[in-house]
Image: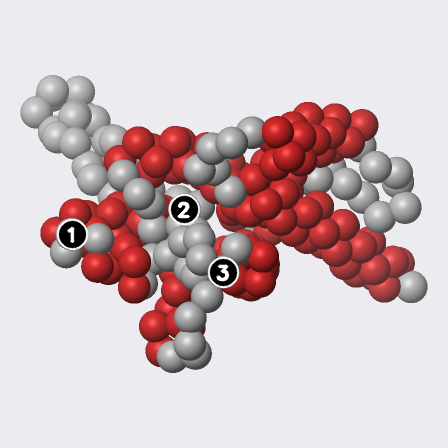
Amino acid sequence: MSDYSMLTETGKSSGKGGSGKGFKIRYDSPVVLTFAVISLAALGLGYLTKGWTTENLFSVYRSKFSFFWLVRMFGHTLGHANMTHFVSNMTLFLLLGPQLENRYGSKNLLEMMGIASVVAGIFQMIFFPNVMLLGASGLVFMMIILTSAVNLKDGAGIPLSMILIILIYLGSEIWDAFTAHDNISHLTHILGGVCGAVFGFLYAKEQGEQAESKIK
C-alpha cells in the first residue's frame, strides 16, 4: 500500500533541533478513498455531460447486453443524482469503509463491493426493469451490517449487537419498502445488508477453519 505524505516546515528553523517528522497525510484506505474519488469524478462528469455519463455508465436498468451493460453492472454504485445524494452516501461510506478495509483487506473488500454491486444490479433489472438505479447506498448498508459482524467468530454464537443492527436497519427498510412512497430503492438497501451478513459469516467461518488448521 503506497502512502502519500505532506511534511510541514515545523522544527527547521526553531533552533531546537526539530526531528523533522512533521505532519503527514496518509492514503490509508486505497479501495475506499479511490472509490470516493471516482464517485466524485462521475458526479462531475454527469454535470458536464448533462446526465449522459450518469445514464450510460453510472446507473443500471434493463437493456441489451453490451459493453456499456457490463460497465453499468459495476459502475452504478459510483453514480449519484446530485451532490446531496453523493454526500449522504459518502459520509457513512468514508466512516465505515477504512475500518473494514483494515479488517478484511483491500482485495477482500473490493470483491465484496463488486459482488454486492452485481447482486443489486441483477435484482433491479429483474424486478424494476424500467427504473434506473444508481448510488452507493447498497454498499453503505453492506458496510453497516459487516461492521456489526466484526466480532463474529465461528462457533462462538452471534453477537447481540449484530442482531440488533440487522433488526433496526433491515427491519426498517423492509417496512419502508411496503409503506413508503419515495424514490429510495429499499430493495437495494436490503440486498446490501444481506450481502454484508453473508460476507461476515463466511469470513468468520474461514477464520475459524484457519485457526483450527494451525492447531492441528
| Picture coordinates of residue 67, whole percent (x, y) | 36, 78
Which color scheme does this rendered protein use? secondary structure
Residue 203 is left or right of residue 15, and the answer is right
What's the residue type where badge 1 is placed? Answer: Lys
| Picture coordinates of residue 144, whole percent (x, y) | 59, 36
Q: Which mark is residue 129?
A: 3
What's the residue type where badge 2 is placed? Answer: Gly
Task: Name the quadrant containing residue 215.
Answer: bottom right
Q: Earlier in the sequence, mark 3 or mark 1?
A: 1
Q: Which mark is residue 135?
A: 2
CA gap, disc 3 to disc 1?
A: 23 Å
Q: Earlier in the sequence, mark 2 or mark 1?
A: 1
Q: Which residue is mark 1?
A: 50
CA gap, disc 2 to disc 3?
A: 17 Å
Q: Which mark lies nearer to you, 2 or 3?
A: 3
**For the residue carrying disc 1, how many other residues have a C-alpha within 10 Å: few (<14), some (14-19), or many (20+)?**
few
Q: Residue at x 46, y 66 (%)?
A: 62
SS assignment at label 3: loop
SS assignment at label 2: loop
> Which quadrant of the figure contains the C terminus?
bottom right
